[in-house]
Every structure is written in C-alpha cells, then in structure tokens.
Image (cartoon, rainbow, N blue to C red):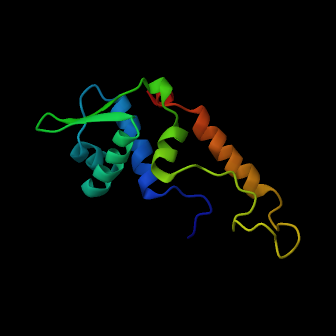
Amino acid sequence: MSNIIALTEAASIGLHGMVLIARSDVVLNVSKISDFIGSSRHHVAKIMQRLSKAGFVSSNRGPSGGFVLKKLPGEITLLDIYEAIEGPLAVQTCPLNRDVCPFGECLLGDLSLRVSRQIKDYLGSHTLQDYL
C-alpha cells in the first residue's frame, strides 16, 4: 500500500522525541527516546544532535545525561522542529515540482497547493505546549 502523504522517519523521530522531552519530568536520553518511539538509537542520536544544534534542546553526557528543552514548549512549533530536520517546507503547486504541466492544467487541480499549505499551517500553528 502506498501513502500520498508520509513523514520521513527523521521528521517523525524529531517530532515525537521533542514531545516526549517536553512531557517528561526527568531528563531523557537517546536510549529512552528510541525505546519509546521504536527507532534505532543511532538514528535518534543523529536527529537529537540536529535539534541540539538548532537550539531546541541541550544535551548532557554521562549516566544521568540526556536532553532538556532550551525554550518553553509554547515557543517551539511543530514546523520549527520539522524544518530543523528536513529544511524549509515548501508550499507546492505541482506534486512533481514541474513549472509547466504537460496537460496544460494539473490533473489534481489545486489539491497539491491546498494540502501542502494546510500541512504547513497546521505544523506552524501547533506548539509542544499543545501536547502537554
């Protein structure tokens, strides 16, 4: 079965990992995050490193180390997290990213534009605070 809309594993790890950290009363490390979301420790570590470089979390090494938010949950949107991992989310008019449709008009009408705009608006209007 195919999906028309799907998140990459990296985006999923970032979004779910950040919500876990925001919800947690204790410092969460890579092992705890990867166990909870069912992803490899290596991939979780890579994504959390990106989020740390983007300034969303700070990380501490050692037995009691892990990740904590550097900003308030209400200051971090899902779009911020997504774009830190995947780059800017473009609102696209063509699902194939073509400037000119061989049929003159897209067979899907403006569906691609509406859906991509809706996704971007949704991610931009929801913060980590919404999931606490």
* Quarter of the rendering occupied by the C terminus: top left
Q: Is residue 66 left or right of residue 73?
A: left
Residue under the point 51% across and 55% down = 7
Residue under the point 52% across and 34% down = 77
Which one is nearer the viewer's eye here, 109 or 52? 52
From the viewer's perspective, is residue 105 above or below residue 67?
below
Q: Residue furthest right?
A: 104
Q: Position of residue 131 (x, y in %)?
A: 47, 30
Q: Position of residue 104 (x, y in %)?
A: 89, 71
Examine the rendering and report whether any part of residue 38 can be seen.
no
Q: Position of residue 32 (x, y in %)?
A: 24, 43
Q: Residue furthest bottom?
A: 102
Determine which quarter of the picture holds residue 20: top left
Residue under the point 71% across and 56% down = 92
Q: Is residue 63 left or right of residue 44?
A: left
Q: Is residue 5 left or right of residue 9?
A: right
Residue under the point 62% across and 39% down = 122
Q: Position of residue 121 (x, y in %)?
A: 66, 39
* Quarter of the rendering occupied by the N terminus: bottom right
